[in-house]
Image (spheres, coloured by chain):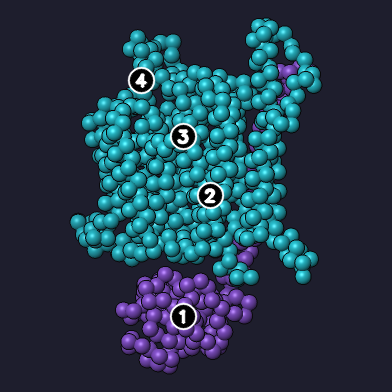
Chain colours: A cyan, B purple
Amino acid sequence: MQANMNSGILRRYRWKELGLLVIPFMILILELVQLRFAQVFQSQITVISQPQQSIPINTAILPSLSYLIPVFGLIVALLLVNLLLSIFFPKADQLLLPLVGLMSGIGVLMAMRLGPQVGDLLQGSRQLVWVILGLIICMATVFGLRNMNWLKRFKYTWALLGIILVAVTIVNVLRVKNLNSPNHDQLNFGPLNLQPSELLKIFIVIFFAGYLSENRDLLTEGNLRIGPIRLPPLRTLGPIMLMLGISLLLFLVIRELGLALLIYGIFLCMIYLGSGKLMYVLSGLLLFVVLGFIGFKLFGYVQIRFSILSIDVVNWQNWSLATQDFARNGAYQIVQGLIALANGGVLGAGFGLGHAGTFVPFAQSDMIFTALGEEFGLAGLFAIIGIYLLIIYRGFRIAIEASDEFNQLLAAGLTSIFAIQIFVIVAGNLKFIPLTGLPLPFLSYGGSSIIANFIIIGILLRISYNTAMEREGLA
Amino acid sequence: MTLDVFLFILRLLFIVLLYLFLMQVVIAITRDLRKTATASENSTNQAPPVVGHLIVVDSGPSNILPGTRFDLSPQTTIGRGPTNSIQLVDNFISSEHTRLWFRNGLWYVQDAGSTNGTYVNNQPAREALAARFGDIIQVGFIRFKLAQ
């Protein structure tokens, strides 16, 4: 009996996931070793101050095993998750964990590496704790979501929770009264800096998914006619519009451009997924352009962010005095980030050998993409974007295969959070659109973002497990 | 070998490993896709077979006649909405009421978040419940017998 059970677990073991985790583990160990050597290299360089003189390798600078403890901790945590999933949820998606594990591992290493440069030695270990906590919460989500209908049934509760989060944030901001500080949207509970917006996006997606899956018929029919355009009944759109309006308005009030962009993007994606009508998306985009223009005219800070886009960095030798001044003040962060990227080149400066932490403001959170670009180069950035693409592909795949409309909308909506957020922050760092203060999923330093992203992964894993169970029976 | 050369080798190794990992994932995905493609080919070749019937035993407050037979395909949904495979127009039926699926010779019944519930032999089917031929399945206030 015992042997039978063991062989059952072995047969159902998630070997594919385990196999895919091997290379990420190798990468993480390799990077930590490299970080050690890079630190020795830089300290030697400053001592002899002659870069051309070669430094021999001796065993004294080899890292001791205790130096590798953070990465081993992460590896053990990932293996435990693999084991737990194999025992209880063998049919959940096997590709997400390796992809996400590698990303968050690189995030921890970046925090360890940038921490000393931004004057916070403990940043790496704190990020590690957040990632492990995130993995625990991810597992709790997978175990806790026994019934997906529970999410759907309490959709107005989630919406209310979202509104409460927004209200708390606003009160907090009005109390602090410092709209220009970069972390004015954080709630401080003792040592914790919570960012309520991270949870808000999940609540909004659950609400949209629940609402749209129930009122889909009304939305697709459209019985209000204005000329050739058919509109859905306003009563049906009411709650969605209300939710959207509240989030957008409030975040314009407390100047969270990135979050407003993210929420509006989620809204458009989910309306399109729910109704299948391009008309809604086009009119939504038109409305967005109009609103954006009004915002541009009304708020000075929006104008500054847009004017950064017009800087011609390549032609820096011919800058006018005004532009030089702008690059030292308003556009400082972006210009420095671009310099870091250019410094990286194709192969990068090497992990631990860049300088982005010292000259790019907020290199560990908002500008992490430029720090990665400097150390890993264009080749590394392409690989990272490739990993993101695969995560997003996997999410939409789970959505397509899901059995009912609510699960489909939920999975697709949660995945589009990743897609939009990655686009907004990467394009912002590359001076393609105005920079907004969103974290890069799994890579940026920050606990709330890590936890929220792992909750999303947990929900996706659970949906994929439910789908597989319905396809292949309960056994 | 000097330290800077060694660091350069480590850097190249890192990039090679990253792309190896990407390749490994893509290979896993294509294998997955091929498997589902052949599976769906097998299943789409024939129209969904009728593997059972629901016979109305007690029509409750609705105006469906007792004795009416509904065909069941291996994946069946019951509800008021037009997307269901069995559409029941009755005020006590939710737009998506019940889902039934057939696996390994057994029927499984699960409530799809309805207001008035689904029962198999008077047991609420909030989680999936197994049902055999001859069992009584209650959808809202309508009672069916599961028949071959």
| Residue type of the residue flagged with mark 3 | Pro
Q: Which residue is mark 3?
A: A191
Whether labels 1 and 4 belong to a single chain: the reply is no
Q: CA distance from mark 2 to mark 4?
A: 39 Å
Q: CA distance from mark 3 to mark 2?
A: 20 Å
Whether labels 1 and 3 belong to a single chain: the reply is no
Q: CA distance from mark 3 to mark 4?
A: 31 Å
| Residue type of the residue flagged with mark 1 | Tyr
Q: In which chain is the residue bearing label 3? A: A
Instruction: Report the residue that reaches farthest toward the bottom.
Output: B67
The x, y position of residue B78, in whole percent, is 43, 76
Crowd rating for badge 3 (residues with CA inside 10 Å; few <14, some 14–19, many 20+): few
| Residue type of the residue flagged with mark 4 | Gly
Q: Tell me which residue sits at (46%, 59%) in the image.
A: A408
Q: CA distance from mark 1 to mark 4?
A: 65 Å
| Residue type of the residue flagged with mark 2 | Ile
Instruction: Report the residue that reaches farthest toward the front.
Output: A190
Is residue A282 something that shows in the picture? no
Quadrant of the image occupied by residue A309: top left
